[in-house]
Image: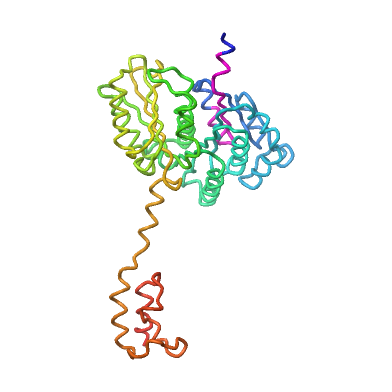
């Protein structure tokens, strides 16, 4: 009987790629994340030895001789391609695959898109959960991270990007550098557990794999917010914190799919859950598909933890990036301004031979709308 029911459980695999990804996997294992299989993939054999993952895959045997990719994404990508068959073998049978990495280095940045492509080709719901590096890590790492995020976005159903700099807004100014990176691993873990716990842990309101798939499949970019609170009105307070979390780089009101996880002890009340869910519903897009569930975890004590994952933005990007484009267009001022210089031009010379007189160029008809006012005025001033 137990074996039969086991077959109906979704098979979830979490793959940590590169140093940051493997560290995040170790953190999840330490925290006791349940119901998933952990896979560590790295070009650094020494770091791999220290991992507690169920499966360890050394993809640097030939190319890097187990010494790492030297922060070179091309080398990381090649190492993953060289071992594509082995990666495929360990991913077979998965219903859902999380690909986690710290973007900006070599193995994670270059290898994660390869792992994601293989997972998706096997039919698994593929979710990327990655960090964007701290700004103090340097411009080169930041540029490599953006390239890696772009490449990974093409290969996953949903991509959650956690901006490490935003973590600094959630901690005190005396935080040690080790603690800052540990906190980044912790948030990566919460991104994964916020989704997997809904499927694998019983609660007041249960979700299954199909519910999660409805929100996450082909959803593009996603944002994650987390909040926790104790005391009176704790669930609503945690939901407010999640919606206004610094990790959310844009408002969730543009999201057409929202996954909401409310975790608490066995004293978590139905009305508490309702208050938190109503707050999220009010903040989301009016037509959003909101799927929420609860997780009962007595280890939380009197704390309630809310995780919001907002996905399915128009164009696959959060509103912040979409909004920044239209503000560049300002063609309106062109109409009144050219009238002044046009008076100095002989009015009858509308057919204007362009090479003869530079003065004739400002006549409104040939001017494309993109040209700014300054460009039209310069010839007159020079005259």
Q: Is residue 244 left or right of residue 120?
A: left
Q: Position of residue 125 (x, y in %)?
A: 54, 33
What's drawn in magenta, residue-wise?
5-26
Where is the N terminus found, in terms of image quarters? top right
Q: Is residue 372 left or right of residue 55?
A: left
When asked about the image quadrant of residue 21, the answer is top right
Q: Position of residue 251 (x, y in %)?
A: 35, 42
Q: Position of residue 200 (x, y in %)?
A: 49, 20
When asked about the image quadrant of residue 260, the answer is top left
Magenta segment includes 7: yes
Name of the residue lying farthest toward the top: 1
Magenta segment includes 48: no
Residue 366's place in the image compared with 236, above or below, is below
Q: Tag count in the figure?
A: 0
Colour scheme of the rendered structure: rainbow
Residue at screen point 25% across, 22% down: 232
Residue 140's place in the image compared with 163, above or below, is below
Q: Is residue 205 left or right of residue 57?
A: left
Where is the C terminus found, in terms of image quarters? bottom left
* Front position in the image: 356 or 37: 356
* Front position in the image: 255 or 63: 255
* Front position in the image: 341 or 247: 341
Q: Position of residue 170 (x, y in %)?
A: 37, 36
Residue at screen point 44% across, 48% down: 315
Name of the residue lying farthest toward the right: 62
């Amino acid at each position: 009987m137990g074996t039969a029911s086991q077959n109906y459980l979704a098979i979830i695999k979490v793959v940590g790629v590169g140093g940051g990804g493997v560290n995040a996997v170790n953190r999840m294992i330490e925290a006791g994340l349940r119901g998933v299989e952990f896979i560590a993939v790295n070009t650094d054999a020494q770091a791999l030895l220290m991992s507690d993952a169920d499966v360890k895959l050394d993809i640097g045997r030939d190319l890097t001789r187990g010494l790492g990719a030297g922060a070179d994404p091309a080398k990381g990508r090649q190492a993953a391609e060289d071992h594509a068959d082995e990666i495929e073998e360990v991913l077979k049978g998965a219903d859902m695959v999380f690909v986690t990495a710290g973007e900006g280095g070599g193995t994670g940045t270059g290898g994660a898109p390869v792992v994601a492509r293989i997972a998706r080709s096997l039919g698994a719901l593929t979710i990327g959960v990655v960090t964007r590096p701290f700004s103090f890590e340097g411009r080169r790492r930041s540029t490599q991270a953006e390239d890696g995020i772009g490449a990974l976005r093409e290969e996953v159903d949903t991509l959650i990007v956690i901006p490490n700099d935003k973590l600094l807004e959630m901690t005190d100014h005396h935080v040690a550098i080790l603690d800052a990176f540990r906190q980044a691993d912790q948030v990566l873990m919460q991104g994964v557990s916020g989704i997997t716990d809904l499927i694998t842990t019983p609660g007041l309101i249960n979700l299954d794999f199909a519910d999660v798939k409805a929100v996450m499949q082909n959803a593009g970019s996603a944002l994650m917010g987390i909040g926790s609170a104790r005391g009176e009105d704790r669930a609503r307070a945690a939901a407010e914190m999640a919606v206004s979390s610094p990790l959310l780089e844009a408002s969730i009101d543009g999201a057409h799919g929202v996954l909401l996880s409310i975790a608490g002890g066995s004293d978590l009340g139905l009305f508490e859950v309702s208050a938190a869910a109503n707050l999220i519903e009010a903040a989301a897009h009016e037509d959003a598909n909101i799927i929420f569930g609860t997780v009962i975890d007595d280890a939380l004590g009197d704390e309630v933890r809310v995780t919001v994952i907002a996905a399915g933005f128009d164009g696959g990007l959060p509103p912040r990036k979409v909004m920044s484009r239209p503000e560049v267009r300002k063609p309106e001022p062109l109409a009144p301004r050219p009238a002044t210089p046009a008076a100095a031009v002989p009015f009858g010379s509308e057919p204007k031979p362009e090479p003869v007189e530079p003065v004739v160029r400002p006549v409104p008809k040939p001017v494309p709308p993109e040209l700014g006012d300054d460009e039209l005025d310069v010839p007159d001033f020079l005259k």
